[in-house]
Image (tube, helix red, strand yellow):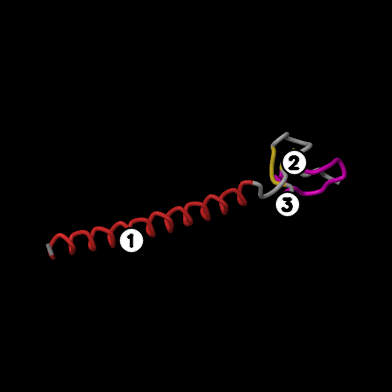
Amino acid sequence: MKLLLWVIVIGVALLALRLVNVAAAKRRNDAARGASAKDARADKMVRCVRCGVYLPSADAKPSPGGLTCGEPACVEQR
């Protein structure tokens, strides 16, 4: 009888640990998904007026004709 009681107690303890571990893994996955979603909407894309390449607006170089990608072939000569 005591053996059966110990088996039940150990089984319940293992089940509780399993539930806690599953909940922690779900929180970690949700946090990782939230961080990747934040990275996905990082910056607005603009188009180079000279070559037509799309690039993040933070990397675009202003020129008299509009935004360029900054490559030597696209930078307008003054």
Mark 3 or 1: the one toward you: 1
Q: Is residue 7 magenta?
A: no
Amino acid at circle 1: Leu
Q: Residue at x 81, y 48 (%)?
A: 62
User: Could you tell me if the residues under marks 2 and 3 are in contact, i.e. CB atoms within 8 Å?
Assistant: no
Q: Is residue 9 depicted above or below 26 in this figure?
A: below
Q: Residue at x 48, y 56 (%)?
A: 27
Q: Looking at the picture, how far across and down is residue 37, in whole percent?
A: 59, 48
- Choose the circle earlier in sequence order: 1 or 2: 1
- Check residue 46 in the rendering and tell me which mark sits there, or answer none: 2
**Separation of marks 2 and 3 at Cα, in angstroms:** 9 Å
Mark 1 or 2: the one toward you: 1
Q: Secondary structure at mark 3?
A: loop
Stretch of the chain drawn in magenta: 59-72
Amino acid at circle 2: Val
Q: How many marks?
A: 3
Q: Nearer the viewer, residue 50 or 59?
A: 59
Q: Secondary structure at mark 2?
A: strand
Q: Residue at x 73, y 35 (%)?
A: 51
- Choose the circle earlier in sequence order: 2 or 3: 2
Amino acid at circle 3: Ala
Q: Residue at x 69, y 37 (%)?
A: 53
Residue lying farthest top? 52
**Left or right of residue 65, residue 47 in this image:** left
Q: Looking at the picture, how far across and down is residue 49, in whole percent?
A: 79, 37
User: Could you tell me if the residues under marks 1 and 2 are in contact, i.e. CB atoms within 8 Å?
Assistant: no
Residue labelled with disc 1: 17
Q: Looking at the picture, how far across and down is residue 28, in whole percent?
A: 47, 56
Q: Nearer the viewer, residue 47 or 28?
A: 28
Residue labelled with disc 3: 58
